[in-house]
Image: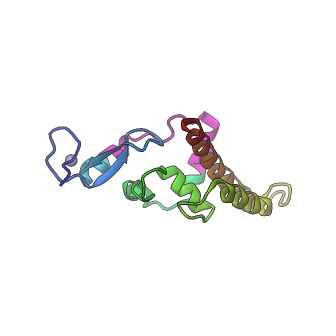
């Protein structure tokens, strides 16, 4: 059985946590230390200010239980190749974990078209939905580009 990776802890380590954003490398913590790691986990890291602000506002709309459940999401992609951000972005677009980038692009375009500010001017709800979709697509596009880089 795995032991918690936190130094000096001998509890079973059953909660995977990424060592860095979008890294397939994982720590394995006990529940207590996973929660502690979550608290210190800056997942806005690497985003520019505007993007971080957009993401923060998009997330306020989401469930309050998310922070507690976060480390369970990290193990959600099956093969560990998708980050929690990607999994959530796929959720926004209502796509499966193994969706390829073509279907991601197709889904983003189809959904964005319906709530685009040009189509629904002055509609705050539509604008918010559009931002959420845009952000999800940005996350997935960036991840796709990183994978291409690595070959
Ligand atoms: Zn521990």
Task: List x then y, in percent, for residue 33.
Answer: 26, 47
Residue 122, picture quadrant = bottom right
Task: List x then y, in percent, for residue 96.
Answer: 56, 64
Scheme of image coloration: rainbow
> Which secondary structure type mostly characterizes the magenta part of the structure?
helix
Number of marks in the image? 0
- Residue 63 lies in the magenta stretch: no
Residue 60 visible, this angle: no
Residue 127, picture quadrant = bottom right
Q: Is residue 88 left or right of residue 15?
A: right
- The residue drawn where x is 54% and y is 60% is 98
Q: Nearer the viewer, residue 61 or 37?
A: 37
Q: Is residue 110 left or right of residue 62?
A: right
Q: Quadrant of the N terminus?
A: bottom left
Q: Nearer the viewer, residue 57 or 138?
A: 138
Task: List x then y, in percent, for residue 17.
Answer: 36, 47
- The residue drawn where x is 21% and y is 47% is 4
- The residue drawn where x is 84% and y is 57% is 121
Q: Is residue 113 left or right of residue 53?
A: right
Magenta-highlighted residues: 37-57
Q: Is residue 5 above or below residue 71?
A: above
Q: Quadrant of the C terminus?
A: top right
Q: Nearer the viewer, residue 117 or 9?
A: 9
Residue 106 visible, this angle: yes
């Amino acid at each position: 059985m795995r032991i918690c990776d936190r130094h000096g802890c001998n509890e079973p380590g059953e909660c995977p946590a990424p060592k860095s954003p979008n890294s397939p490398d994982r720590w394995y913590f006990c529940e207590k230390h996973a929660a502690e790691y979550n608290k210190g986990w800056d997942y806005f890291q690497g985003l520019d200010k505007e993007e971080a602000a957009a993401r923060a506002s998009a997330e306020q709309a989401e469930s309050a239980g998310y922070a507690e459940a976060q480390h369970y999401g990290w193990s959600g992609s099956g093969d560990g190749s998708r980050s929690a951000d990607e999994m959530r972005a796929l959720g926004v677009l209502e796509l499966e974990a193994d969706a390829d980038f073509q279907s991601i692009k197709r889904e983003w375009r189809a959904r964005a078209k319906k709530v685009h500010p040009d189509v629904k001017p002055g509609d705050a709800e539509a604008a918010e939905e559009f931002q959420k979709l845009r952000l999800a697509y940005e996350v997935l596009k960036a991840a796709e580009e990183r994978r291409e880089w690595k070959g």
